[in-house]
Image (spheres, helix red, strand yellow):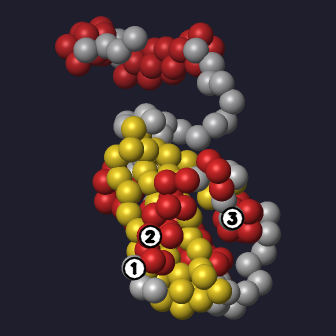
């Protein structure tokens, strides 16, 4: 229950400062007992969670590389993009696609909860901290994407099979096709 400013002032006028703080503390304690938080899942921002599907690839390893992404809010496609990356490895392209997607999501929504889906198990596990980033050409990309991810209210990333990442995969292939 939210008290109007008028009611807050009326209660505060009736109680001395020390009793006012005790009143507030008791109200918060009662509310927390009555409405306990369930689990420790990601926080939901004012716009709710945003889902990002990103994919990068290269034809050859390294080779002609590109990436694509699709951004969804409440199941509705609200943004997408693709980019040609030049000569890169598959894993570099995955990070570059995720970077582009996160930048676009931040431009569109700012500080919200983000849930990303990639079909690169390596990138997902590195971003989760489960795998070390051993490749010297990947460390700067990992660090940059991590810094961008830290700008969001919450960041979650999971692996999906390629079949569930069709829009981003198509966009990545279109980016690579542009420079053949």
Based on the displayed image, in which of its 4 quarters is residue 20 positioned? top left
Task: Decide which of tag 2 and tag 3 comes sooner along the chain.
Answer: 3
The residue identified by callout 1 is 178
- Across and down, in percent, residue 174 comes to 44, 70
- Across and down, in percent, residue 112 comes to 43, 47
Q: CA distance from mark 2 to mark 3?
A: 18 Å
Based on the displayed image, in which of its 4 quarters is residue 33 positioned? top right
Nearer to the camera, 90 or 23: 90
Asked if one can make out residue 13 in the rendered structure from this viewpoint, the answer is no
Asked if one can make out residue 84 in the rendered structure from this viewpoint, the answer is yes
Dot 2: few (<14), some (14–19), or many (≥20) neighbours within 10 Å? some
Q: Determine whether 10 is above or below 124 in the image.
A: above
- Across and down, in percent, residue 4 comes to 25, 14
- Between label 3 and label 1, give the one nearer the viewer: 1
User: SS for tag 1?
Assistant: loop
Q: Are marks 3 and 1 in contact (CB under 8 Å)?
A: no
User: SS for tag 2?
Assistant: helix
Q: Is residue 42 left or right of residue 74?
A: right
Q: CA distance from mark 2 to mark 1?
A: 6 Å
Tell me what residue is drawn at x 45 percent, y 36 percent.
75
Res 21 label: none
Tell me what residue is drawn at x 74 percent, y 63 percent.
121
Tell me what residue is drawn at x 59 percent, y 89 percent.
63
Q: Determine whether 69 is above or below 180 in the image.
A: above
The residue identified by callout 2 is 174
Farthest residue, direction left: 6
Tell me what residue is drawn at x 25 percent, y 10 percent.
7
Q: Are marks 2 and 1 in contact (CB under 8 Å)?
A: yes
Q: CA distance from mark 3 to mark 1?
A: 23 Å
Dot 3: few (<14), some (14–19), or many (≥20) neighbours within 10 Å? many
Task: Decide which of tag 3 and tag 1 comes sooner along the chain.
Answer: 3
The residue identified by callout 3 is 120
């Amino acid at each position: 229950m939210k008290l109007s400013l008028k009611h807050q002032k009326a209660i505060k006028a009736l109680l001395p400062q020390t009793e006012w703080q005790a009143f507030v503390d008791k109200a918060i304690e009662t509310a927390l007992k009555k409405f306990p938080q369930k689990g420790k899942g990601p926080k939901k921002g004012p716009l709710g969670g945003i889902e990002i599907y990103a994919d990068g690839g290269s034809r050859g390893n390294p080779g002609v590389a590109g990436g694509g992404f699709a951004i969804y809010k409440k199941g509705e496609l609200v943004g997408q993009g693709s980019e040609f990356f030049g000569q890169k490895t598959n894993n570099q392209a995955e990070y570059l696609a995720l970077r582009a997607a996160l930048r676009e999501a931040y431009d569109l929504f700012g500080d919200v909860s983000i849930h990303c889906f990639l079909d690169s198990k390596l990138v997902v596990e590195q971003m989760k901290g489960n795998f070390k980033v051993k490749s010297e050409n990947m460390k700067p990309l990992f660090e940059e994407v991590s810094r961008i991810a830290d700008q969001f209210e919450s960041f979650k990333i999971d692996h999906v099979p390629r079949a569930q990442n069709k829009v981003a995969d198509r966009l990545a292939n279109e980016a690579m096709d542009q420079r053949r």
